[in-house]
């Protein structure tokens, strides 16, 4: 029987509050806040973006984790809430949201690094480069996807991936690019999809980039201060974070390499790290996918925090670009996010294994979720116009989680910060204020 889950408001913050009641309780139990006062200037900034992440994800992940708190709660990093609307819509897309975070200017949905009037915008990467700092972008999507692209490209349409790749390779302030999207850098005769026939990997190498193609390449490369790196570890996006991947690096491994490389810069660095696929899980209403990729993202946050605590001059900022899916949570002993730990695949991957007659449906979903399904639930999946969504809905219900949308929403998102100038992100702020806070800390 399906469990009816009401839509819940999971977190409420008002201007002047820097943490939620839950966070205050955690802080009081654990002692004083762990966020030290380093002053207002940051030599380095690590900007962590869990795409699509909001309070519903944060609350769900706390229950999913079971042992210990997520690092952003353990370190008492919660600062406030961020409004995400774009220039032309109450509900933003990743291009407009990324542009606001990267440039401090709101633009129309679909536009990257360009104002609504068509003017190119200066990004935090541009400013950091002008200040002599190194810059890196890391993502689990194609590296040319909307959020990373907003930091180093200016195009009218977010799907102009070939031009974004051109601008990345020729950007004078980019020192490191790690993610997926190899096919967008190669011509068709070499396994790519570029209509202009260019081989941008060769062009990048001619411009001083060291090219990395596999997990082994990354793990065996000794990051050099005077090098630039282009790491493209998949033809398209990287694989979802279900178990060990022997071919592609994890988000944590890419983040660790990026920090090792960029931190050799005497003048400091700016690094953007995106957990891209949390958003895709939200679009699919796939609770297990959302939690597993949040877990992979937390590893990147923990590595960043380890560096910042030792370094003492690094500002950490973590904020989603928008909410995806309108996730809410009502866990109990039987239905809670911890039930998702044994899920081995996304809903989409499971349905790809099911034959057209659904004869092996129960076998596939039981084997890949370690959950039992009633005949009514199996029938619901079989008779649905969207079997994948029906499966994901049922698995979410078994985890005490429910969704209100398969798209972005207008929900404000929580912002977390640690280190120099962290107080700039307190209270209710706009996504353009995130850029302003980072700029004040890094370029002052």
Image: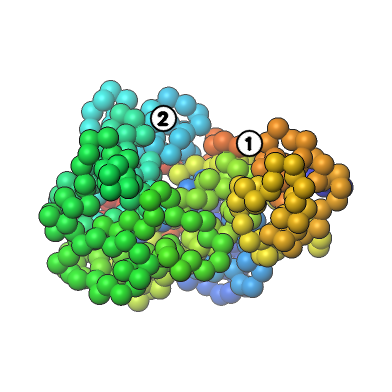
Total number of numbered discs in the rendering: 2
Residue drawn at x 68%, y 65% as measured from the top left: 342
Residue drawn at x 33%, y 50% as measured from the top left: 182
Residue drawn at x 76%, y 56% as measured from the top left: 363
Q: Can residue 56 be seen in this view?
A: no
When asked about the image quadrant of residue 220, the answer is: bottom left
Q: Identify the residue under disc 1.
A: 405
Give the Cα separation between the discs numbered 2 and 1. 19 Å
Whether residue 359 sits left or right of residue 327 in the image: it is right
Whether residue 23 sits left or right of residue 375 in the image: it is left
When asked about the image quadrant of residue 176, the answer is: bottom left
Q: Is mark 2 on a helix, strand or loop?
A: loop
The percent position of residue 315, horizontal first and vertical second, equals 34, 62
The percent position of residue 320, horizontal first and vertical second, equals 47, 48
Q: Nearer the viewer, residue 53 or 75?
A: 53
Label drawn at residue 109: 2
Q: Which of 236 and 129 is in front in this view?
A: 236
Q: Which of 244 and 261 is in front in this view?
A: 244
Q: Earlier in the sequence, mark 2 or mark 1?
A: 2
Label drawn at residue 317: none
The percent position of residue 227, horizontal first and vertical second, equals 17, 65
When asked about the image quadrant of residue 285, the answer is: top right
**Quadrant where the image shows the C terminus:** bottom left
Whether 137 is drawn above or below 338: the answer is above
Q: Is residue 4 visible?
A: yes
Q: What element carries label 1?
A: loop
Crowding at label 1, few (<14), some or many (≥20) Cα neighbours within 10 Å? some
Residue drawn at x 22%, y 39% as measured from the top left: 197
């Amino acid at each position: 029987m399906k469990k009816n889950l009401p839509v819940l408001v999971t977190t409420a913050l008002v201007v002047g509050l820097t943490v939620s009641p839950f966070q205050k309780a955690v802080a009081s139990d654990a002692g004083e806040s762990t966020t030290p006062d380093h002053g207002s200037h940051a030599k380095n900034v690590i900007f962590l973006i869990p795409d699509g992440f909001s309070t519903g994800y944060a609350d769900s992940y706390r229950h999913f984790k079971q042992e210990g708190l997520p690092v952003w709660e353990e370190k008492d990093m919660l600062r406030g809430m961020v409004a995400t609307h774009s220039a032309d819509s109450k509900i933003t897309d990743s291009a407009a949201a990324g542009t606001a975070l990267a440039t401090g200017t709101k633009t129309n949905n679909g536009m990257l690094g360009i104002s609504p009037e068509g003017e190119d915008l200066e990004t935090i990467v541009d400013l950091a480069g002008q200040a002599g700092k190194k810059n890196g972008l890391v993502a689990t999507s194609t590296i040319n996807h909307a959020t990373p692209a907003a930091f180093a490209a200016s195009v009218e349409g977010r799907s102009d991936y070939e031009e974004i790749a051109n601008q990345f390779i020729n950007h004078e302030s980019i020192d490191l690019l790690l993610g997926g999207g190899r096919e967008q850098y190669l011509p068709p005769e070499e396994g790519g999809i570029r209509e202009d026939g260019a081989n941008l990997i060769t062009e990048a190498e001619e411009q001083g980039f060291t090219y990395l193609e596999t997990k082994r390449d990354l793990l065996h490369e000794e990051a050099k201060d005077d090098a630039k790196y282009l790491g493209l570890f998949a033809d398209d996006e990287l694989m979802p974070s279900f178990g060990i991947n022997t071919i592609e690096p994890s988000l944590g491994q890419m983040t660790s390499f990026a920090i090792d490389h960029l931190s050799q810069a005497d003048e400091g660095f700016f690094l953007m790290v995106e957990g891209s696929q949390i958003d895709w899980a939200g679009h699919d209403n796939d609770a297990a996918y959302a939690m597993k990729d949040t877990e992979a993202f937390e590893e990147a946050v923990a590595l960043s925090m380890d560096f910042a605590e030792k370094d003492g001059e690094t500002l950490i900022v973590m904020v989603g670009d928008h909410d995806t899916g309108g996730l809410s949570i009502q866990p109990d002993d039987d239905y809670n996010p911890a039930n998702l730990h044994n899920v081995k695949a996304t809903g989409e991957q499971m349905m790809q294994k099911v034959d057209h007659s659904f004869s092996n449906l129960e076998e596939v979903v039981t084997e890949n979720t370690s959950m039992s399904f009633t005949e009514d639930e199996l029938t619901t999946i079989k008779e649905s116009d969207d079997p994948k969504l029906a499966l994901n809905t049922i698995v979410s219900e078994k985890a005490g989680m429910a969704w209100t949308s398969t798209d972005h929403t207008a929900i404000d998102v929580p912002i977390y910060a640690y280190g120099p100038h962290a107080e700039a992100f307190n209270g209710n702020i706009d996504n353009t204020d995130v850029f302003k806070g980072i700029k004040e800390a890094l370029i002052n």
